[in-house]
Image (tube, rainbow, N blue to C red):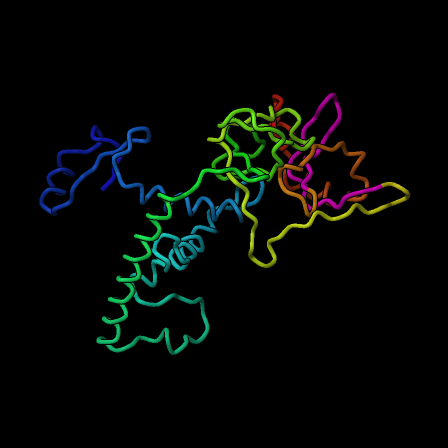
Amino acid sequence: CPTRGSVFVSQITKELSQRLGIRLQPSTAYHPRTDGQSEIANKSVETYLRHFIGYHQDDWEPLLALAEFSHNNNRHASTGISPFKANYGFDVTIGGIPSSEQCLPSVERRLKTLATVQEELTASLEEAQQLMKNNSTGMSDQLQSGIKNISTTRPSPKLGHRWLGPFPICAKILQSVYKLTLPLSMKGIHPTFHVSVLKKHLQDTINGRTREEPEPVVIKGEEEWEVAEILDCRRKRGKREYLIAWKGYGPEDNSWEPAVNLTHCQQLLKDFDIKFPEAEKRHTRSRRFR
C-alpha cells in the first residue's frame, strides 16, 4: 500500500492496516519503495491523454473515463491480454449485441476459462521478463530525442510530446553521445545528445499511421504549405507571430510565422484570436523550442 512517506502515516492508519493484514510501504517521489504499478498505470493514462488533448491542455478531464476503459480493455505487453480478460475471462465491448463468446458461460466453463487465462498470464510475464533482459541498446540510423531540457510553450510539459523526431544521425561523438541533424525550427537546440535522452526510431506498422510529408501548393508562382492548426501567438520586435502546425508534419516542424505569411487562412486566425485572447500575454520571455 503506497503512501506519501512514513511521516504522513498516522497511528490510526498503522493500527487499522495491521488488523486488516495490510503491509504498508511508505514512499516518496525520490525514495520509492513500491513496485511501481501505480506509476506505470498513471504513465499509461498520461500517454492516452497526450494524444487526444488540445494544444492548450484544457480539455483533459472529460477524457478520463474513456482513458480508464481503454487502459483496462487494452492488451498489455507483459501479460498478452487485457485486465478485463484477466479478471472476467472476456474483453468488454461498447454497446451493441454481445457475441456468443462474450455471453456469461456456465460456472464450470468460467472456472476453466479463468484457469487458462492465469496460465497464459504466467507464461506471458515470464516471456516479457526474459525479453527485457535480452533487450539490446544498439542505435539505428534515426533516433528520437526526449523533451528533457527542451522548453515548450504548452502549459504543462507532463502532457506534452515525450519524444521528438525521428532525426538522422549526423555523427557518433562517443559511445554514449550522438550528434543529430535537427530541422531549422530547432536551431536554438544544441544538436549533441546523450543516449539517456535518445531512443531508437521504430517504424510504425499500423495501417493509417504512416505519415507522408505533402508537397507544397503553388499559388501565384510561390510555394505554400497547408496550415493544420494555429497553436499559439506572441509579439516579437513589435510584430505579431503565430505558432503554426503544418498539415502532414510533426511537432518538430512547427514554426513561428508573421501574420503577413498567413494571408490565406484568415478564418483560422480569427477563430484563434477569439478563443485565446490572452495567448500573447503569456510570452514574457523567449523560449528555446516551439
**In the depicted view, which residue is nearer to us: 177 or 260?**
177
- In this view, 173 is above or below 154: above
Residue 78 in picture, x, y percent from top left: 36, 52
Q: Residue at x 24, y 71 (%)?
A: 112
Q: Residue at x 47, y 49 (%)?
A: 48
Main SS of residues in magenta: strand
Quadrant of image for the C terminus: top right
Q: Residue at x 49, y 27 (%)?
A: 175
Residue 56 in picture, x, y percent from top left: 57, 39
Q: Is residue 242 magenta?
A: yes
Q: Residue at x 80, y 42 (%)?
A: 224
Which residue reaches farthest right?
Answer: 220
Residue span colored magenta: 223-245
Quadrant of image for the N terminus: top left
Residue 164 in picture, x, y percent from top left: 57, 37
Residue 169 in picture, x, y percent from top left: 61, 33
Residue 75 shown left or right of residue 53 in the figure: left
Residue 271 shown left or right of residue 1 in the figure: right
